[in-house]
Image (cartoon, rainbow, N blue to C red):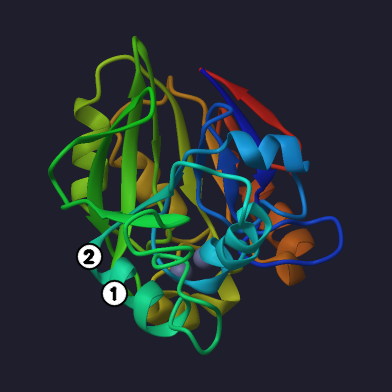
Amino acid sequence: MRIRVLGASGGELCGHGSTSFLLDERVVLDAGALTSRLRLAELDRLDHVLLSHAHLDHVKDLPLLADLLAGRRRRPLVVHASPGAVATLRSSLFNGRLWPDFTRIPSARRPLVRFASFRHGVPFRVGAFRVAPVRVSHAVESTGFVVRRGTACFAISGDTGPTTAFWREARRAQGLRALLVEVSFPGRMQRIADRAGHLTPRTLPGELAKLERDDVPVYLYHLKPAFRAELREEIGGLGLRGVKILEDGDEIET
Ligand SMILES: [Zn+2]
Ligand SMILES: [Zn+2]
């Protein structure tokens, strides 16, 4: 499996795309950097968007993607999200006011976008992948995933503060070859991070220790672009082995 990092950040700034990982040509995880990163032919090939949650830095390109694909697709683009995230997208984004309701365009029977709800703890298929969704600890309903195709397997934390079930699921995952973990704010902003449900370099080491092994490569993502230099320094000072900060354009081989 080769994961292509379209956007590695927890926000957007020139040179730093918001969270988006292309898993293969048909499946993307989070939609923070799609329409600015992929060509039309690549967007046409997408069939599935898997969402960690419905915060804007993870869904912001969905409405623009739907608009671009209008008149170009026969099958709906399937957006997989937790029930709370689907409810937010329906009421607050594709609501016919902020943006057209593409789940009823061009018709309710053959829409451009279809929402598929998953339930935490119940594995499901997304294209060629088998996905185990785990509830994590964030300001809104948020999900971490263990994603598998054949023998290749990786885990991604989603937006989360310190959490438990995700690490249990990652520990149990056979053949885990990569771990993608969020870290958002520098340690001096710990209170804000705790309130919002994010990790800092202060809380990160304790979370990584919950994996109970250090032979899995760790890729950090969701750094807030405005604090990137400060975060780099703090993370470097932790002296963690096998840990890399992801950049847009990176590829992860699993
Ligand atoms: Zn986020
Ligand atoms: Zn979030």
Q: Position of residue 37 (x, y in %)?
A: 76, 47
Measure the alpha-carbon separation of dots 2 and 1.
Answer: 6 Å
Q: Nearer the viewer, residue 93 or 13?
A: 93
Q: Position of residue 182 (x, y in %)?
A: 50, 53
Residue tagged 1: 87
Which residue reaches farthest right?
14
Tag 2 secondary structure: helix
Which residue reaches farthest top?
151
> Count of labels shown?
2
Residue in the picture at 60% in, 39% down: 239
Q: Which mark is residue 83?
A: 2
Residue in the picture at 38% in, 53% down: 110
Asked if one can make out residue 127 in the rendered structure from this viewpoint, the answer is yes
- Residue 129 lies left or right of residue 135; in this view the side is right
Amino acid type of the residue that numbered disc 1 sits on in the rendered structure: Ala
Mark 1 neighbour density, 10 Å: few (under 14) some (14–19) many (20 or more): some
Mark 2 neighbour density, 10 Å: few (under 14) some (14–19) many (20 or more): some
Tag 1 secondary structure: helix
Q: Nearer the viewer, residue 200 or 123?
A: 123
From the viewer's perspective, is residue 155 above or below residue 24?
below
Q: Position of residue 17 (x, y in %)?
A: 72, 56
Q: Which mark is residue 201?
A: none
Residue in the picture at 33% in, 68% down: 85
2 and 1 marks in contact (CB < 8 Å): yes
Amino acid type of the residue that numbered disc 2 sits on in the rendered structure: Pro
Q: Nearer the viewer, residue 61 or 198?
A: 61
Q: Position of residue 199 (x, y in %)?
A: 46, 62
Residue in the picture at 72% in, 53% down: 232
Residue 18 occupies quadrant: bottom right
Asked if one can make out residue 245 in the rendered structure from this viewpoint, the answer is no
